[in-house]
């Protein structure tokens, strides 16, 4: 059932028809206009690894620089360099995974 659903969405995206389904799956904010296969190479509709995000976002150092005023910096910690989608989501709610163990006063946009 899920597999069929994904195929239907993939097909709709490829053909540019059934726009309702594909449009609902648009990635969030600045990623909305990206072709689906930017993140779903080979039609694999799962969260891409960090290497995909880093094609545009450069490096963990680069994103850590952007959040350097946050305490703690979510992009620089004892957790190293996890997949971006451990916290960020592209179609659903994000989730700040540090707070699985901590109680930092930090919320992701849209959380
Ligand atoms: C094809 C290029 C590209 C890819 C791939 C990409 N991004 Fe982005 N991302 C952008 C652009 C462009 C922006 C808007 C400018 C900026 O904030 O850098 C952006 C912005 C963001 C923002 C800030 C959004 C906001 O509203 O403040 C986050 C968070 C983000 N990207 C996370 C990710 C994650 C996680 C991935 C991998 C799943 C990813 N990006 C993959 C290009 C990309
Ligand atoms: C910037 C990267 C990015 C782009 C572009 C993108 N996705 Fe995704 N997609 C993700 C991530 C990350 C997930 C994992 C779940 C989440 O973050 O919401 C995902 C999960 C999915 C899933 C699995 C359902 C789920 O909620 O786990 C489907 C289906 C999907 N995407 C369809 C699409 C379609 C169709 C497009 C093009 C209209 C698209 N995606 C564009 C990053 C992206
Ligand atoms: C699996 C549990 C776990 C996760 C997830 C986790 N931490 Fe930790 N963290 C710890 C433990 C255990 C310590 C050391 C004991 C302590 O100081 O509480 C620690 C210590 C710290 C410290 C120094 C002590 C403090 O509380 O100021 C910081 C800063 C920190 N973590 C940040 C992060 C950030 C940022 C993330 C997410 C990227 C994260 N942690 C995710 C378990 C975790
Ligand atoms: C441990 C959780 C976590 C991980 C993993 C993570 N981020 Fe973030 N990210 C955050 C938080 C928290 C913010 C600040 C709140 C927000 O923008 O949602 C943020 C903000 C951002 C921003 C916006 C910064 C700005 O200028 O406002 C970008 C871009 C971004 N992250 C990209 C990435 C990329 C790319 C990766 C993977 C290389 C990644 N993040 C991994 C938690 C995380």
Image: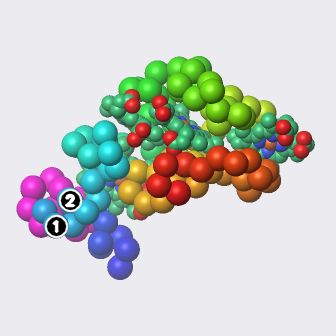
Label pair 2/1, CB-CB below 8 angstroms: yes
Give the farthest residue toward the bottom.
1
96 magenta-colored:
no
The image's mark for residue 72 is: none
Q: Position of residue 107 (x, y in %)?
A: 59, 50
Where, by quadrant of the figure, is residue 23 drawn?
bottom left
As helix, strand or loop, the secondary structure at mark 1 comes to: helix
In which quadrant of the rendered view does residue 30 lie?
Answer: top left
**Residue located 31% across and 41% down the image:** 31
The reply to whether residue 41 is visible in this rendering is no
Mark 1 nearby-residue class (10 Å; few <14, some 14–19, many ≥20): few
Q: How crowded is the residue under tag 2: few (<14 C-alpha within 10 Å), some, or many (20+)?
A: some
Q: The N terminus is located in which quarter?
A: bottom left
Q: Which residues fall within the magenta stretch?
A: 7-18
Q: Which residue is mark 2?
A: 23
Q: 4 or 34: nearer the eye?
A: 34
- Residue at the spot 79% in from the left edge and 51% down from the top edge: 102
Report whether the residue tagged 2 is closer than 8 Å to ligand 2: yes
User: As rendered, which of 28 and 25 lies closer to the eye?
Assistant: 28
20 displayed left or right of 61: left
Residue at 25% x, 41% y is 34
Residue 64 appears left or right of 105:
left
Give the alpha-carbon distance from disc 2 to disc 1, as whole Å: 5 Å
Dot label at residue 20: 1
Task: Where is residue 53? Give x, y as percent.
Answer: 44, 34
Residue 10 lies within the magenta run: yes
Residue 11 to residue 62: above or below: below
Position of 53 relative to 42 (above/below): above
Q: Report the predominant secondary structure element of the magenta stretch.
A: helix
Secondary structure under tag 2 reads helix
On the image, the x and y values in percent for residue 52 come to 43, 34
């Amino acid at each position: 059932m899920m597999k069929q659903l994904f195929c239907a969405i993939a097909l709709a995206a490829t053909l540019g028809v059934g726009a309702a389904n594909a449009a609902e799956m648009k990635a969030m904010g600045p990623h909305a206009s990206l072709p689906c296969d930017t993140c779903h190479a080979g039609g694999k509709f799962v969260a891409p690894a960090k290497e995909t995000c880093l094609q545009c976002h450069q490096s963990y150092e680069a994103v850590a620089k952007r959040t350097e005023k946050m305490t703690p910096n979510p992009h620089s910690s004892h957790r190293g360099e996890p997949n971006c989608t451990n916290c960020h989501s592209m179609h659903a709610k994000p989730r700040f995974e540090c707070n699985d163990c901590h109680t930092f006063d930090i919320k992701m946009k849209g959380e």
